[in-house]
Image (cartoon, grey):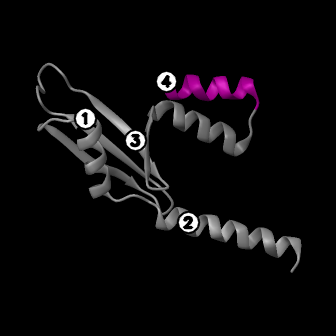
């Protein structure tokens, strides 16, 4: 087997694992119930991608005073709290491998 073929098999295996370990909305609700006990919360899968999902949790206990909202990245059957702005900047900058000065321009454009 050639090295190129081994690499493609490895990439395909990683993609298959990501697809099968993309957590469901039910698993996210169980996670939030454990992490943030209480009765007044709203959960939703805001974005579903084949390899991962973005989930949102909102505290509805006192919506006039506290409008608390958190986003989580669901991947490999785990959930990681994310800052939406930072993940967009990191993804854009890393995927196209731009310089630091260009990264600052992207951050300025997104923060407006």
Magenta stretch bounds: 99-112
Label 4: how many Cα within 10 Å (few below 14, some 14–19, many 20+): few
- The extreme front residue here reads 34
Query: Looking at the picture, how far across and down is residue 70, in whole percent?
Result: 33, 34
Q: Residue 111, labelled with which disc?
A: 4
Callout 1: SS: loop
Q: Residue furthest top?
A: 65
Mark 1 vs 2, N-terminal side = 2
Was residue 12 drawn as part of the magenta stretch in this picture?
Answer: no
Measured Cα–Cα span from mark 4 to mark 2: 34 Å
Q: Residue at x 24, y 45 (%)?
A: 43
In the rendered view, tell whether residue 17 sits above or below residue 84. Answer: below
3 or 4: mark nearer the eye: 3
Rendering coords of residue 48 (x, y %): 40, 57
As displayed, is residue 37 above or below residue 64?
below
* Pointer 3 or 1: first along the chain: 1
Q: Nearer the viewer, residue 29 or 34?
A: 34
Task: Give me the C-alpha separation between circle 3 and circle 4.
Answer: 20 Å
Disc marking residue 5: none
Horizontal and vertical percent position of residue 95: 68, 45
In this rendering, which labeled residue sits more in front, label 4 or label 2? 2
Give the left or right position of residue 62, taking residue 68 as reference.
Answer: left
| Residue at the disc numbered 3 | 72
Give left or right: position of 24 versus 107: left
Q: Which residue is mark 2?
A: 17
Q: Secondary structure at mark 3?
A: strand
């Amino acid at each position: 087997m050639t090295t190129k073929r081994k690499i493609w098999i490895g990439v395909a295996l990683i993609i298959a694992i990501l697809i099968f370990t993309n957590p469901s909305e039910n698993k996210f609700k169980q996670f939030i119930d454990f992490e943030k006990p209480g009765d007044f919360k709203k959960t939703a899968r805001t974005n579903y991608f084949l390899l991962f999902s973005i989930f949102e949790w909102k505290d509805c206990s006192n919506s006039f005073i506290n409008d608390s909202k958190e986003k989580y990245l669901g991947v490999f059957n785990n959930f990681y709290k994310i800052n939406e702005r930072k993940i967009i900047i990191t993804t854009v900058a890393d995927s196209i491998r731009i310089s630091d000065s260009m990264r600052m321009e992207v951050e300025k454009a997104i923060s407006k």
